[in-house]
Amino acid sequence: MKYSVKINSVKTIDEIENSWNNDDFRELLKRFDYADSDIIKPNELKEYLFMAISDFEPDEAAAIVLDYKLSEELTEGQIENLSHEMMREKVSENYSDIYIHKLLFNINQLLYKAYNGKFPAAKATVIEFEMREEPDEKTEITKELVLKALGAGLLEKNLITRLFKEQLDGNVSFAEAEGIIWDLYDKGGSQYEMTTSEKWLTKLDIKNMEFECTVTPFTEKVEKE
């Protein structure tokens, strides 16, 4: 499949918009022993939560927020370990399970701002781009397809191109694409927006802002009996 790709903008952010809502803030206030969250005005919830969090040690606060968001994915022991690791390193970049990196980023940044920098500051990258199939056959644009197409415009030193060459070439399945790209939005008219960690991609990794490429889909081989 052949595509023409044009990258329109690349920006760095420290918070994903709408990653937390008022229901999250109210529930977390209860978990941080603030009993009257229901009477707080919506626009003041985050401020009150930050005040409640500050009454706890950073690792204790991390464990509470991790449990709220990831209790179904992680054991108590893993949450306990992560609550300490978060003080020393960017777990949203380094944790072994890349499929929860987005959640870890949101948790990390909430705690980073609540404690005015006691946690490492993580960053994310938002890319707006145009991607058209040649000829125009309207193939579904998936995270895997986007990474394979963008790979053609990245420098060889980029971490994705170095770690996932076989996946980009279509030789093996690229399930990791679901964890590498955190969000992918179709904005209409062949315009898309994606969010990922700056670990995987920044503006400095891009070799060409406009290019054509060929994407090879992975086809699982069936052994003949």
Image (cartoon, rainbow, N blue to C red):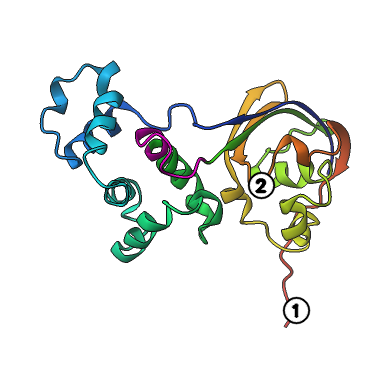
| Side of 59 where 16 appears, left or right | right
Residue farthest left in this picture: 35
Between discs 2 and 1, the one toward the N terminus? 2
Hey, what amino acid is under mark 1? Lys
| Residue 224 image label | 1
- Does the magenta portion include 117? yes
The one nearer the camera, 119 or 106, is: 119
- Does the magenta portion include 15? no
* Residue 135 in view, yes or no: no
Residue of label 2: 200
Question: Which secondary structure, mark 2?
Answer: loop
Identified at 22% across, 31% down, the residue is 26
The one nearer the camera, 203 or 102, is: 203
The one nearer the camera, 91 or 101, is: 91
| Residue 150 image label | none
* Magenta stretch in the rendered image: 111-121
Q: List x then y, in percent, for residue 1.
A: 83, 44
Q: List x then y, in percent, for residue 31.
A: 19, 42
Is label 2 or label 1 in front? 2
Hey, what amino acid is under mark 2? Trp
| Side of 213 where 129 appears, left or right | left
Quadrant in which residue 223 is drawn: bottom right
Disc 2 and disc 1 in contact, CB within 8 angstroms: no
Mark 2 Cα shell of 10 Å, populated few (<14), some (14-19), many (≥20):
some
Identified at 71% across, 65% down, the residue is 220
Q: List x then y, in percent, for residue 224.
A: 75, 79
Predominant SS of the magenta segment: loop
Identified at 76% across, 47% down, the residue is 148
Question: Which quarter of the figure is the C terminus placed in?
Answer: bottom right
